[in-house]
Amino acid sequence: MNITARDRLRLLGGASAALLGACGGGGGGGGTSAGQTAGTPVVPVTPTPPTPPTPAQTFVPAQGALRNAYLNDFKVGAAIQAAWIDEAGTDIDALKSQFNSISAEYEMKPDIIAPTEGVYDFTAADKIVDFAIANNMDIRGHTLLWHRTTPDYFLTGTKAEMKAKLEAYITAVLTHFKGRVTTWDVVNEVITDNGSEAQSPYRNSNWYQAVGSAEYIDWAFNAARAADPDVKLYINDYGTESTGKRNRLITVIDDLVARNIPLDGVGHQAHINVNTAASNVLQAVDAIDARFAGLENHITELDVSVYNDPGSCFNNQTGCAADYGTAIPASVIAAQAQLYRDVFTGLATRSSVTSVTLWGISDDRTWLNGYPVDRTNAPLLFDRSRAAKTAFRAVTDPTFEI
Ligand code: G3I
């Protein structure tokens, strides 16, 4: 029970009045107390000190509180690294306790699985997949094709040779994980951020430049479907909460659907910040629902940065919001919690949303501690000591007052 300042004053006032009475001292406090007759010595009463308030208890979430809060709505996932699995008492405890889906933060990408053409190393990826299966968790395969994690060999030779190398890679990977990985981000971040570029809506990436068109996207989806008819195939990107990026993505999806390129869902990375309007995230889902009945939506990399940076911070690391250090203002923590609550509750009302993944577990290991600049960020549901944050309580307890 928290003792208010008023309570404390009342308690101390009572004690000081008794003390004054015992000493026959001044003020109104010199009276005798019941049972005493005038003249008898008054034994000083040692005041009972007020019970000190209990230190703020660290909130300990109930087992399964997060995943169970949305059990009928969507899987709740987290991105992890294979190295964390052997650590005890840290992120993995929270993962096993609160989540029911996993993404590999980097170990299921081509630069890790096959840095050399035709040579596959699934060791780290299998560690994550085996852990997920042993703990009854889904796995979101991330990702088969991303311009930032494409070894050079993919992008050399004729179009036919590049197509054959991509098909060979995708076939090998999907065959290896068949029956264990339920969803794949087949292509990641293939939409341009700049709608005025000549090749818009496509990103002018290494893939686009090597192939000379966006045809590589068709190759990827067709190869994935041929390798595994049962796995869900996603196109994944960031910035879908912004109408321009979202509309370019929709243009690309329109084209894929029109040409019967196999596609099951849209991944919205949702790397947002405390100034993002939850409605913008929800409108991204609504826009897909409105145009593509039957496609699923996944939130694939959710985190809420405590900083709202200008474009220059992302472009050339200038004008970035000042580092809070570990003293994140209470107002920012509260705004983050409210935004998480609004996003989660809004997504739970949209039946096309079948998975929501946080891009990490605890703040001390978020990629945002190093992007766009080195700075202390706090974008996730567990803090640096792996205690559940206000945001965790906000998304798991509707009665919790932020
Ligand atoms: O720590 C290992 C080291 O032990 C190992 O020897 C080395 C081998 O390359 O990798 C090291 O891991 C690094 C890893 O991050 C952990 O810090 C990798 O080099 C590095 O490439 C990796 O970066 C990841 C990045 O994607 C590229 O895969 C980030 O963790 C990850 O957060 C980031 O995630 C992306 C999504 O896939 C797509 N959306 C954006 C998001 C953030 O950039």
Image (tube, grey):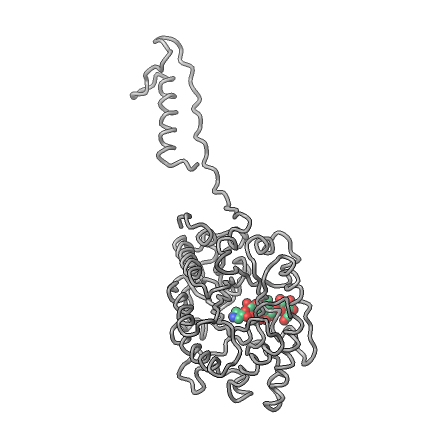
Ligand 1 lies in which image quarter? Answer: bottom right
> Looking at the image, which is closer to me, 237 or 313?
237
> Looking at the image, which is closer to me, 186 or 400?
186
Q: Can residue 201 be seen at all in this image of the molecule?
A: yes
Quarter holding residue 249: bottom left
Could you say where residue 337 lies in the image, as x and y percent from the top left?
42, 55
Could you say where residue 277 lies in the image, as x and y percent from the top left?
37, 64
Q: How many numbered discs, if any? A: 0
- Kindly identify the residue that appears in the image at 42 percent across and 58 percent down: 345
> Looking at the image, which is closer to me, 194 or 24?
194
> Looking at the image, which is closer to me, 126 or 111?
126
Q: Can residue 383 be seen at all in this image of the molecule?
A: no
Could you say where residue 217 lies in the image, as x and y percent from the top left?
53, 81
Q: Residue furthest left?
A: 28
- Kindly identify the residue that appears in the image at 48 percent across and 61 percent down: 377
The relative height of residue 237 versus residue 5 in the rendered view (above or below) is below
Could you say where residue 363 lies in the image, as x and y percent from the top left?
52, 58
